[in-house]
Image (tube, rainbow, N blue to C red):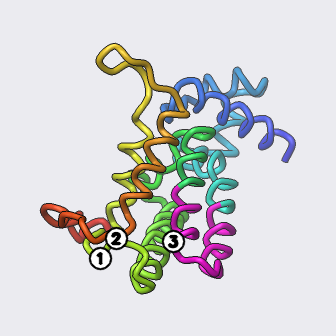
Amino acid sequence: VHNDALILRAARALTLEDGLELRAHAVAERAGVSVGTVKRRFPTRDHLLLGVYSDVAERLRTLADELRQHPEPFTALADFLREVLAIEESRPGYTEVLGYLTDGEIEVWRAEYLDTCRDLTERAQAAGLVREDFDWREIPFLLRAVGSARGWMLGHRADRAQARRLLEVSIAGLAPCDTQTPLPGAGPHEDLD
């Protein structure tokens, strides 16, 4: 158990530095354990990523349960979007892991995440607080677009605060208004389910 904590602490640090391309040798070196210990405890990179992000999955699970009970449906949806963006800022890679790993536990996390997107969006739409032409399956795309608003663009520098600002603009755009133009096209294809 002590080695697991060392390994996961090292893997978390490496994901912040190098992204999701974890290598057993680098994790072992950072953790101060042997490569064999890393591979015995976490046989594949997917197992290691499960360990790295299990606390995030639990955090979102708890938040989703709370937000489904929130008395204000629009606030619940907005708070969920803000929290996912904050997670991606502090623990980058979580939604990317949801998108491409296929381990059984990851599939549970993915389903929970998408169920939360659907439930909170549909609840707010039913209350007339979110435009009807917004598809809940667009949430991961919206968050990815907003989260990528960092770096330089046309001579201006954007930081994490810019991403949060753009999220607030996006949240405001979800609310129906008398003068809104219908959204063009359709939402994502059904194969995201």
Which of 119 and 79 lies nearest the eye of the viewer? 79
Give the percent coordinates (x, y) of residue 111.
46, 70
Magenta highlight range: 60-81
How crowded pointer 3 is (Cα within 10 Å; few <14, some 14-19, many 20+) is rated as many
In what quadrant of the picture does the C terminus appear?
bottom left
Kind of residue at disc 2: Pro
Mark 2 / mark 3, whichever is N-terminal: 3
* Residue shown at the point (55%, 64%) measured from the top left: 105
Verify CB contact (< 8 Å) between mark 2 and mark 1: yes
The amino acid marked with disc number 1 is: Glu
Estimate the spatial distance between the alpha carbons at disc 2 and disc 3, rounded to whole Å: 11 Å
Q: Which residue is mark 2?
A: 176
Callout 1: helix, strand or loop? loop
Magenta-drawn stretch contains 70 = yes
Quarter of the view holding residue 146: top left
The residue pinned by badge 1 equals: 132
Tell me: residue 3, above or below residue 66.
above
Residue found farthest to the top: 155
Residue at 73% across / 36% down in the picture?
7
Q: Residue furthest bottom?
A: 126
Q: Which residue is mark 3?
A: 74
